[in-house]
Image (tube, rainbow, N blue to C red):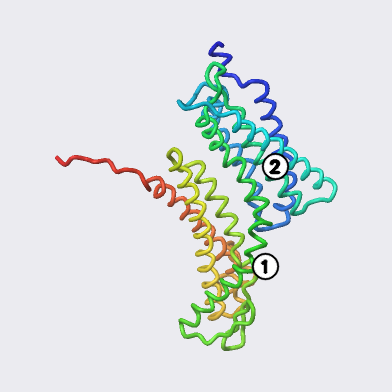
């Protein structure tokens, strides 16, 4: 086979790629209902573009594996493993088809969204595994196949954060987060000798004024957005081979979630102290106490909105700062001889 032919994707691989693009477009249409109605998931509009960017960034390496230009020295993949991958591909397509039919008939919901998203992820990873070629039509090695699958992890699995995260995580922990935030903030107030009472998720001050820790203050918005940002930063900027890069990316996602929770506690603590000293209604005014719509109202918005925006900017800065730290983690230091 000529080098020119070797560098081109075969017809089957191109066909599977076009099929995945169509599935991703349908997944976008399905999850659009979540992005457009849930304020916590407006970051979802970025998912298709970020996936496209990551694929573009990794395309040269991925194409080399899919065409056989690059191959790892290892044993070829066993027929049994290839059969399992084929079964996963067929099962994923069936799951996606079931979810798409349910979405078209019954509308948006937990069942269709989970089936569509997991069907897309399973099909993409299985197609990638099966499409890797060895040099000169040789059977591809397992190492090459898994390397290609690793390159596809972010573009396929990130859809689980923008859609199924709502049903698998959000609905399960939002109430618990809300309760914990209320308990921590009230504990901080008591530690500062403020005689407050707690009724449900409402903190009552000694003067009878009160501030409620609403659902929007549970931190689920910052949690989902930070997990998405952490996944993207990890996929693009964290370095190293397997398993180092994978461990760093998992650590990045964990740190992103932890950062979101800590900053949300700090934001709610600040808002509560501000309400304690200036009254609960001050949270819906700007820092100067001017009502929305009045002359001189700050362009930064209300105290409540400003605190949320500052927390999100701080989260992004912290996540970016984690990148060089994680890249250094586990790397041997250069031994420099002293002069």
Residue 286 location (% of width, % of height): 58, 69
Residue 82 location (% of width, % of height): 61, 31
Q: Alpha carbon of mark 1 to alpha carbon of mark 2: how far?
A: 48 Å
Residue 83 location (% of width, % of height): 64, 32
- Residue 119: which numbered mark, if any? 2
Q: Which residue is mark 1?
A: 293
Marker count (numbered) = 2
255 shown above or below 87? below
Residue placed at 61% from the left, 87% from the top?
Answer: 208
Residue 55 location (% of width, % of height): 58, 35
- Left or right, 257 with reference to 330: right
Q: Residues within 10 Å of mark 2 (few under 14, many from 20)?
A: many
Question: Dots 1 and 2: beta carbons under 8 Å?
Answer: no
Which residue extends farthest left?
A: 339
Label located before the other in sequence (1 or 2): 2
Q: Quadrant of the N terminus?
A: top right
């Amino acid at each position: 086979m000529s080098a020119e032919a070797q560098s081109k994707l075969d017809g089957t691989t191109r066909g599977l790629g076009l099929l995945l693009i169509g599935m991703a477009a349908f997944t976008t249409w399905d999850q659009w209902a979540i992005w457009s109605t849930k304020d916590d998931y407006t970051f979802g509009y970025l998912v298709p573009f970020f996936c496209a960017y990551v694929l573009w960034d990794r395309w040269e390496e991925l194409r080399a594996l899919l065409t056989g230009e690059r191959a790892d020295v290892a044993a070829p993949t066993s027929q049994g493993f290839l059969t399992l991958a084929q079964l996963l591909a067929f099962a994923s397509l069936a799951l996606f088809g079931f979810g798409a039919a349910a979405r078209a008939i019954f509308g948006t919901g937990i069942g269709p969204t989970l089936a569509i998203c997991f069907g897309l992820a399973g099909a993409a990873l299985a197609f990638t595994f099966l499409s890797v070629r060895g040099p000169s039509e040789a059977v591809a090695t397992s190492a090459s196949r898994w390397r290609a699958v690793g390159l596809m992890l972010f573009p396929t699995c990130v859809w689980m954060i923008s859609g199924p995260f709502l049903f698998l995580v959000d609905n399960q922990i939002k109430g618990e987060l809300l309760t914990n935030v209320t308990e921590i903030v009230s504990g901080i107030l008591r530690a500062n000798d403020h005689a407050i009472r707690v009724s449900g998720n409402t903190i009552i001050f000694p003067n009878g004024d009160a501030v409620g820790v609403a659902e929007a203050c549970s931190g689920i918005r910052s949690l989902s957005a930070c997990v998405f940002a952490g996944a993207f930063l990890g996929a693009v900027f964290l370095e190293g081979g397997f398993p180092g890069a994978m461990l760093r990316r998992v650590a990045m996602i964990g740190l992103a979630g932890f950062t979101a929770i800590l900053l949300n506690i700090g934001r709610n603590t600040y808002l509560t102290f501000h309400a304690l000293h200036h009254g609960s209604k001050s949270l819906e005014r700007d820092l100067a106490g001017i009502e929305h719509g009045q002359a001189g109202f700050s362009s930064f918005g209300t105290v409540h909105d400003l605190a949320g925006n500052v927390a999100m900017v701080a989260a992004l800065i912290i996540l970016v700062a984690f990148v060089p730290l994680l890249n250094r983690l586990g790397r041997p230091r250069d031994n420099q001889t002293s002069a």
